[in-house]
Image (cartoon, rainbow, N blue to C red):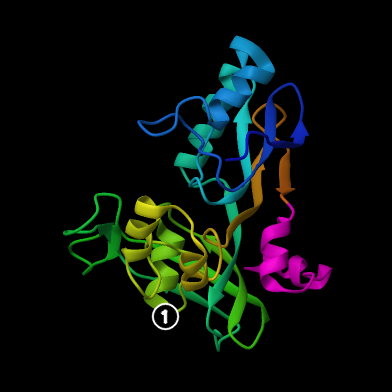
Amino acid sequence: MPLFFDVLYEDEAILAIDKPSGLPVHPSATYHKNTLTFLLRERFGDDSPQIAHRLDRETSGLLLCGRTLDAERELKDAFENRRVSKRYLAIVQGVIPQDEGRIELPINQAKEGLHILMEVTRPDEGYPSVTRFRVLARSERATLVALAPESGRQHQLRVHLSALGFPIVGDKLYGPEGVQPFLDYLDTGMTGPLRRRLGHDRQALHAYELTFQHPSTGDNMTLHAPLPDDLIALWGAPVDAAALAAVATC
């Protein structure tokens, strides 16, 4: 488990972090000291920055923190009221034929199975959920795609891409085998055979860009977290600047 983070931007009001995959954000029954919250307290002391939103443990990328109480409140309110534009990068199984699109499928907690599992439902049974996507590059068996969620449901991007027929590489819950890889991982950890089944050690999802209003100055800001080395290696080639520039048009 990584016990570090990189600082992407810092001023008196905010701190922007590049969270590595595998680092949980908050303490839980499973993770105590090995969390981003603990690392922030270690580095900054009792007056440590407060995390304004969340990422799954396996998802890498950009996280914003408030360094003052007012900044924390402003950022959390902006996220809760959809005033922050979020864009992700993902590597998915299969070749998406269309260059761009919009996935509009309601989501709710699964009626059966694991309590963390979400699923697409009928409109009268789920919460409205929308994800825009833009294809950045294709290989023979995979697609590099930019994702822009218009809503913020749990596991939304993973559920929507799976429902579209292009699950995220390495996803232990929403891939072709359903939840079995997740159960196998809990039992044995990441083994060679399991890695080959999944295609990667972790879900190939990265929080790449945030556009928001600075809580103190009111200026519009856009920050980026570079694609991590493990996803560049998974893709098998550098992602060129033109492709990354297209993320903003998603």
Where's the N terminus, which quadrant? Answer: top right
Crowding near pointer 1: few (<14 within 10 Å), some, many (20+)?
some
Q: Main secondary structure of the magenta part?
A: helix
Work out whether 153 lies above or below 240: above
Count of marks overlaid on the render: 1
- Range shown magenta: 226-250
Helix, strand or loop at label 1? It is loop
- Taking the spot 77% from the left edge, 66% from the top edge, the residue there is 245
On the question of residue 154 being in view, the answer is no
The image quarter containing residue 123 is bottom left
Percent of width and height locating residue 103: 43, 72
In the picture of the structure, the residue carrying the numbered disc 1 is 165
Q: Amino acid at mark 1?
A: Gly
Percent of width and height locating residue 164: 41, 78
- Taking the spot 35% from the left edge, 31% from the top edge, the residue there is 29
Work out whether 90 lies above or below 108: below
**Is residue 233 magenta-colored?**
yes
Residue 33 is left or right of residue 146, and the answer is: left
Percent of width and height locating residue 213: 65, 39
